[in-house]
Amino acid sequence: MSTKRRVLVVGIVLADVANLADSIAQSLASSREWTVEQQWVAIGKIPYRDASLQVVESLSLSEPKFVILNRVLGSTNLCDYAYVIITDDDIELPPFFLDQYLAWVGKYDFALAQPARTHDSYIDHPFVEQLDGITSRQTRYVEIGPLFSIRADALPILTPFDVTTPMGWGYDFTWPLAMDAANLKMGIVDAVPVSHKLRKPVANYVHSDAEEQLKKYLAGHPHLKREEAFYIVQSFAY
């Protein structure tokens, strides 16, 4: 694993709707333990002008999330970073999030990880809701959003993202097998949950299209069933 204390944050902000991109960027930039570089892509008819955001690309028309991420990551020298963090623009981060989150990720050797979600968040899969009384859990499931981290040694395994399913639906059921094959751990950090309640999920793209892409993707890739994926390998208490 890289010993460089550098983190790349790649975020997507929907400029025409309510978002929390500014506060997310400011929180991540406030790290005392890591050198943080941020690359944001703004989507919308309204130009995004906030100086706190490093916008590397502006799109007037929407593109699928992971198509955009492939383009940004493909134009970046990822060897310079210990971690890449992918984030949406509609979450609230707890104080001192990045340093605490990566401390737990490092302690438990998670090459792929996500923070849990707060109890009052929108949650598609109850498995990712914060479990009180533990710091972290090694799992067979890490969700594709709203924020997840990939350690340097997992990047060649998980990227570039397969755009058979360009919104990412289904990755989280194939990732566990790829991580297992590489003998790398994945997990959820419960000690620093994020709040995801600004916008309802799936509000800004067509659900039926993503569902069809999911079926096509999973049909062509080995993957876990839900009951296999939503599994805690080991939990860690305070």
Image: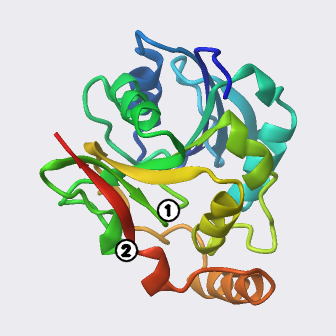
Disc 1 marks which amino acid? Glu
- Marks 2/1 in contact by CB < 8 Å: the verdict is yes
Give the residue furthest to the right.
75
Q: Is residue 1 visible?
A: yes
Q: Position of residue 14 (x, y in %)?
A: 56, 49
Q: Secondary structure at mark 2?
A: loop
Tell me which residue sits at (77%, 80%) in the image: 221
Residue 109's disc number: none
Residue 143's disc number: 1
Disc 2 marks which amino acid? His
Residue toward you, 184 or 126: 184
Tell me which residue sits at (33%, 70%) in the image: 127
Q: Is 95 situated above or below 146?
A: above
Q: Position of residue 234 (x, y in %)?
A: 34, 58
Q: Position of residue 18 (x, y in %)?
A: 41, 48
Residue located beneath label 2 in the image:
125
Q: CA distance from mark 2 to mark 1?
A: 9 Å
Q: Is 78 situated above or below 169?
A: above
| Residue 150 sits in quarter | top right
Residue toward you, 58 or 139: 139
Q: Closer to the N terminus: mark 2 or mark 1?
A: 2
Residue toward you, 213 or 171: 171
Taking the image as shown, residue 101 lies to the left or right of residue 215, namely: left
Quarter of the image where the N terminus is located: top right
Q: Is 167 situated above or below 109?
A: below
Q: Position of residue 174 (x, y in %)?
A: 66, 72
Q: Is residue 168 visible?
A: no
Dot 1 crowding, Cα within 10 Å, few <14, some 14–19, many 20+: many
